[in-house]
Image: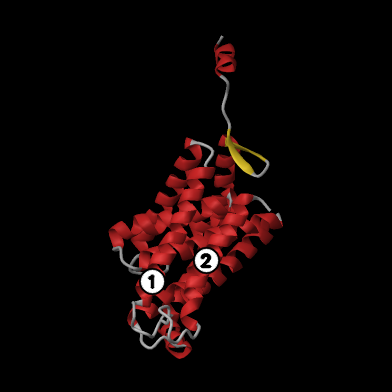
């Protein structure tokens, strides 16, 4: 297993552990979410933020050049802007679809970075708050797992069906994870029952998200994926699992001009 994938797995597990801890009884510990010693919501937000920062630092270390950075910035901006016109439609929006396509075509790290930028940029218009790092991390998991689907070597209609089902499942799973921030900050006590009630309160919102993912993948998935793949083939070649810039030596350029 490459260093990059090991890092992704370890940081993802760290972030997920922060979500799981409130469900574990830690009576008497400073991490007891019901002890009142510190706000568990604040503690969790700090740790999730560090997890997201870890991905950014790893991407900066692993990025092969300006083209890859520009690519991720472009994908993240497109995804973020696609969220804004749909802001009033109860989470029926295409940005998760763009995150899935980005991760699927360009790999887990690009998928995570696109997802993080989606939340970071779009919330500049929709409002930042303690939910932002949770959105960055949870959408990032969507991008990571979409990148892993590439190993299945899907083609044709089967590819779109699998991605549509994947998007539908993640629409619900995203809600299961992201709703922890609201539960941690505003609901007391922190128990399984209160968490399930929090999920029940968001069932329409999460269902709309799931349907939107399946809809956009089914209608636009094939075209968007083919477009991204053409862009990938034009500017990058792959060696040893690392995306590298396609550059033309200056001597060859001069020869061609002559």
User: Which residue corresponds to mark 2?
Assistant: 14
The quarter in which the C terminus is drawn is top right
**Which mark identifies residue 43?**
1
- Residue 154, above or below 129: above
* Secondary structure of residue under mark 1: helix
* Secondary structure of residue under mark 2: helix
- Residue 193, above or below 22: below
Point 39% across, 63% down: residue: 133
**Which mark identifies residue 82?**
none
**Figure disc tally:** 2
Point 55% across, 40% down: residue: 231
Quarter of the figure with residue 87: bottom left
Quarter of the figure with residue 234: top right
Please provide percent x and percent y for residue 130.
34, 68
Q: 66 or 190, which lies in front?
A: 190
Is there a contact, CB below 8 Å, between mark 1 and mark 2? no
In screen coordinates, is 197 left or right of 100? left
């Amino acid at each position: 297993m490459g260093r990059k994938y090991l890092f992704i797995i370890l940081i993802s597990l760290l972030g997920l552990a922060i979500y799981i801890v409130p469900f574990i009884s830690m009576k008497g510990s400073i991490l007891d979410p019901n002890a009142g010693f510190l706000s568990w919501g604040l503690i969790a937000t700090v740790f999730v933020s560090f997890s997201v920062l870890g991905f950014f630092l790893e991407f900066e270390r692993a990025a092969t050049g300006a083209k890859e950075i520009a690519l991720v910035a472009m994908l993240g901006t497109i995804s973020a802007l696609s969220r804004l016109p749909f802001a009033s439609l109860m989470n029926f929006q295409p940005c998760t679809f763009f995150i899935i396509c980005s991760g699927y075509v360009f790999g887990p790290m690009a998928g995570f970075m696109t997802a993080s930028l989606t939340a970071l940029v779009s919330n500049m218009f929709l409002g930042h708050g303690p939910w932002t790092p949770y959105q960055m991390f949870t959408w990032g998991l969507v991008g990571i797992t979409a990148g892993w689907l590439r190993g299945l070597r899907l083609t044709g209609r089967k590819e779109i069906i699998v991605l549509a089902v994947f998007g539908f499942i993640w629409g619900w799973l995203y809600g299961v994870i992201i709703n922890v921030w609201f539960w941690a900050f505003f609901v007391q006590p922190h128990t399984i029952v209160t968490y399930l009630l929090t999920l029940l309160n968001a069932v329409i919102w999460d269902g709309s998200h799931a349907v939107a993912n399946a809809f956009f993948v089914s209608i636009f998935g094939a075209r968007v994926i083919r477009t991204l793949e053409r862009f990938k083939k034009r500017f990058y070649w792959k060696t040893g699992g690392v995306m590298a810039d396609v550059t033309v030596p200056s001597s060859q350029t001069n020869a061609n001009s002559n």
